[in-house]
Image: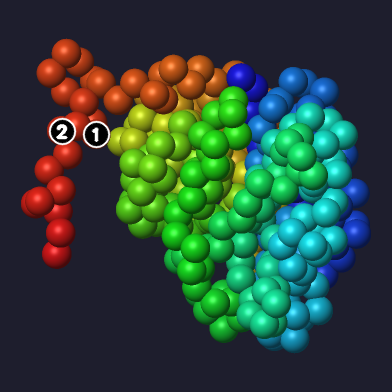
């Protein structure tokens, strides 16, 4: 199975412009055979909001809002599954830093995740996620979703892996330099593939690092982005992610001793 990240430079508060750019990159990934394409966090709106009103002006409902509808249509047309970060407004007007997963099944909507660990000024605008960590069985794979700063908490990837994820899709807007080094270890300790799709560019003094990363269950870096817009497609072998054995005596899940972990 082929998977991809698209690394892009969203234009702040310009969803239509960002749909066009995302579509161009997703089409390239689909042409190269990718079946799962991961986009950055908040690919539709940009990231560095200055007020809650700015977020309210661009956030949409999931799945009825324009971003999810755009992704559903593209998924159906191209036959690809897409995981993408988007600003969500629920029916009561509450805001979430969310990700949606769409695919060529039925109308195209599969589900959503709301970011659990909010980073820095996100806490001024968004509610913390209330849906838990979720794994979506899309037939060809089980895909867990987490967003950017969730990576700093190893419990995020661990929970997704324990819930059965083969692949962790990780839409991101990274500003600290560490995740490209850390994600291969998240992949290794959980024996899963990870796809971190980061953005590039700058917004009001925040610089995004690019370096999107696809890592294997053996901590190999299968793809690493530059600091510009790009698409990378790699082949993954899910049987590797489904085998949690390290040798004939160690299984990284069965050997866990959770009775010693709780505080
Ligand atoms: C981040 O969570 N966007 C750093």
Q: Is 189 on the left or on the right of 47, as rendered?
A: left
> Could you tell me residue 168's position as x and y percent?
50, 40
The image shows residue 242 at horizontal and vertical percentages of 39, 24
Relative side of 120 to 159, left or right: right
> Which mark is on residue 253?
1
Name the residue nearer the viewer: 154 or 62.
62
> Which residue corresponds to the image point at 53% horizontal and 56% vertical from the top-left?
148
Cα separation, mark 1 vs mark 2, equals 5 Å
Secondary structure under tag 2 reads loop
Q: Which residue is mark 2?
A: 255
Number of other residues with Cα within 10 Å of mark 2, as a class: few under 14, some 14 to 19, many 20 or more: few
* Coloring basis for residues: rainbow
Element marked by disc 1:
loop
Res. 210 visible in picture: no
Q: Quadrant of the C terminus?
A: bottom left
**Where residue 52 appears, x then y in whole percent?**
69, 85
Q: What quarter of the picture does the N terminus occupy?
A: top right
* Residue at 79% over, 62% down: 64
């Amino acid at each position: 199975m082929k998977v991809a990240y698209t690394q892009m430079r969203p234009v702040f508060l310009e969803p239509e412009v960002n749909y066009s750019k995302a579509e161009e990159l997703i089409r390239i990934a689909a042409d190269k055979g990718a079946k799962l394409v991961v986009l950055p966090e908040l690919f539709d709106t940009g990231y560095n909001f200055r007020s809650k009103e700015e977020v309210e002006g661009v956030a949409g409902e999931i799945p009825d809002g324009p971003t999810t509808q755009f992704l559903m249509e593209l998924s159906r047309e191209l036959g690809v599954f897409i995981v993408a970060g988007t600003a969500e407004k629920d029916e009561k007007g509450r805001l979430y830093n969310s990700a949606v997963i769409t695919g060529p099944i039925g109308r195209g909507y599969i589900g959503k995740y709301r970011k659990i660990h909010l980073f820095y000024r996100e806490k001024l605008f968004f509610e913390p996620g209330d849906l838990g960590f979720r794994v979506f069985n899309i037939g060809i794979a089980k895909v867990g979703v987490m967003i950017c700063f969730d990576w700093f908490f190893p419990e995020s990837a661990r929970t997704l892996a324990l819930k059965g994820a083969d692949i962790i899709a990780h839409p991101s807007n990274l500003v600290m330099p560490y995740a490209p080094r850390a994600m291969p270890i998240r992949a290794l300790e959980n024996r899963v593939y990870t796809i971190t799709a980061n953005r590039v560019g700058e917004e009001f003094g925040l610089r995004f690092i690019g370096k999107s990363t696809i890592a294997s269950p053996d901590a190999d870096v299968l793809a690493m982005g530059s600091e510009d817009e790009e698409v990378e497609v790699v082949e993954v072998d899910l049987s590797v992610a489904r085998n949690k054995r390290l040798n004939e005596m160690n299984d990284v899940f069965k050997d866990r001793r959770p009775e010693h972990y709780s505080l």
